[in-house]
Amino acid sequence: MALIRIQGVEVRYNSVKALDDISMDVDEGEIVAVLGPNGSGKTTLLKTIDGILKPVKGSVYIDSKNVLQMGRKEAAKLVSFVPQHINMVQGVKVIDFVVTGRKPHIDFAPTTRDIELVLKYLRYVDAEHLADRDIMELSGGEFQRILIARALVAEPRIILLDEPTANLDIKYQIAILNLIAKLSKEKKLTVVMSLHDLTQAYRYAEKAIFLNNGRVHAMGKIEEVMNEEVIEIVYGVKAKVMPNLRAVIPIT
Amino acid sequence: MNRIARLFKLRKLFLTVILLLLLLLIPLSISIGVYRATLLDAFKLMLGDNSIPVEVRAALLLRLRRVLASIAMGIVLGVTGTCMQAVLRNPMASPFTLGISQAAALGVAIALILGIAGSVQYRVTLISNPYILPIFAFIFSLLQVSLILVLAYRAMLSERALILAAIAMSFLYQAILSLVQYLALNELQIAMVVFWTFGDVGRVDWTALKMIAIVAGVLAIYYMIRSLDLDLISLGDDIAYSSGVNPKRLRLEATLVSAFGVSMVTAFAGVIAFLCLVAPHIARLVVGSSHRYLVPASMLVGAALLLVADDIGRTVVSPIILPVGIVLSFIGAPLLLYLLLRGGG
Ligand SMILES: Nc1ncnc2c1ncn2[C@@H]1O[C@H](COP(=O)(O)OP(=O)(O)O)[C@@H](O)[C@H]1O
Ligand SMILES: [Mg+2]
């Protein structure tokens, strides 16, 4: 069975239906892009996969187990969620922040091994030199790398990223996406991420799901679903898809 | 990495320094007062040396009780402030600024009025049943706690709005107290109730001290165990839940524990203004915001600050002893104003 199986999921915020009848399979090691305009349900889908939001209908299975029925600790060991925003507190050092990601493995207090792992993953995202920096004093790109390191220290099998390239300049966007690609390849990590940039989705994802008003409009191999018709219906924008360049350009 | 090892060492060093300062403050605080004792006398008393004269010994023992009470209550107030700031993600939060202390004080006043009916022998009531006052304080503080949680998470009040709403509630509690005083009480009772709205550590007797010390110990252990969870909840509910910490449960649990600790302090010493807001901020400046260090630091800073404030209260217009609550208001009020103006960032 697929590592992540989403089956007929419906999620509501009180009376607002945010996801409607979503089904999707993700295999181990795959990179999946969640696409769609603002408010289409991308963040909601990621949170539902992690069990943060509870569907009113349908279920999410991780490694054949219902995510809501496994303990939170067990779920946290399998899945790491990288949110778009966190509440920033002054006086929190990068090392303090990243070590919170070890929580599912820590009983009382972080051990030396936990700290060593934190440093290892900081090195992995090329941010070891930032370890004793205050998290309020980082650039956007640095902070995004720290967020990813925090997700990695739990040594999960799945990482969910909510718009990891938002607010970054092009250089950092590419750096982050390359990092994610490297993770998927080297660590066989399964990646589900929401993205705004279709070209980036085209280049980095193997699979895509297009959401529109909480429903799946198209889903499948990136080469198959990334077409002009889908983009026009989902985003209401005419675009040119260039398979030879793996790029999508909006035409106005 | 060396720099990280150094960072952790430095934090531990800071903690040790505050601890040493606190330990130094104990004999110093015992020695100062109307009757001037020497530091040596204070040390002798602490070591149980019987060579000091009996009447001096009695006076110093009273001071020792006062000092220990300050430390125990400072621990409780410092750590509950830190806890409330984390679980509400609000740097202006604390049992005092959230009106929990004031609600507890109203509970105490009502217990006193109901329990003693025309007598002012409250110490007799206290000794016959020392649990009544904290129980009343706790029940009333729970009303305020539920209100705060509803305002913050159902009505989604912003940080500042929540503090202002809580201050409004404090005024309401004051108003109820005033009404009761105006309608129902005689002068002696009024004096006693007013007394309770200014925190004073001198009121804590040995029984109360034992109870507060136990509570301080329990809270210290509880918050140390929860320190990583407090780190997580201060980052956000989603991220906490994703890492295996249930934020709603933690918020409720930690707030209840805080309310319990503060009720205990308020029941025996009255409302001690601002300490629970100030201590966490000073501790944060010293060791940063990682709760593994912030929790012990805010306990130590709370204890040291309350001790110093009480020493000031005992000496500044000696021989009159000012309640420590009044002394602390002079330090705390400007700080709250500063935080409100800065927008709590
Ligand atoms: N906490 C919330 N309360 C109520 N409605 C929400 C909440 N979060 C999201 N929504 C609604 O759910 C829908 C999907 O939102 P979201 O998943 O955040 O979309 P996206 O991430 O694609 O921008 C939107 O219509 C949004 O307004
Ligand atoms: Mg979103």
Image: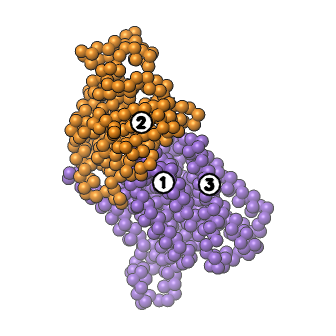
Chain colours: A orange, B purple
Expressed as whole percent of the image width and height from the top left, the position of residue B292 reads: 37, 57
Q: Confirm if mark 2 falls within 8 A of ligand 1.
A: no
Indicate the amino acid at tag 3: Gln
* Label placed on residue B250: 1
Q: Nearer the viewer, residue A38 or B259?
A: A38
Expressed as whole percent of the image width and height from the top left, the position of residue A236 reads: 45, 15
**Seen in the image, is B133 located left or right of residue A32?**
right
Can I make out residue B10 in this image? no
* Label placed on residue A68: none
Is label 2 in a helix, a strand or a loop? strand
Is label 1 in a helix, a strand or a loop? helix
Indicate the amino acid at tag 2: Ile
- Bin the neighbour count of mark 1 within 10 Å (Cα to Cα): few under 14, some 14-19, many 20 and up: some
The reply to whether label 1 and label 2 mark residues of one chain is no
Would you identify the image quadrant in which residue A196 lies? top left
Please give the count of numbered marks on the rendered protein.
3
Could you tell me which residue is drawn at 60 percent across and 47 percent down? B150
Residues at marks 3 and 2, CA–CA distance in whole angstroms: 42 Å
Q: Nearer the viewer, residue A101 or A77?
A: A77
Residues at marks 1 and 2, CA–CA distance in whole angstroms: 29 Å
* Label placed on residue B144: 3
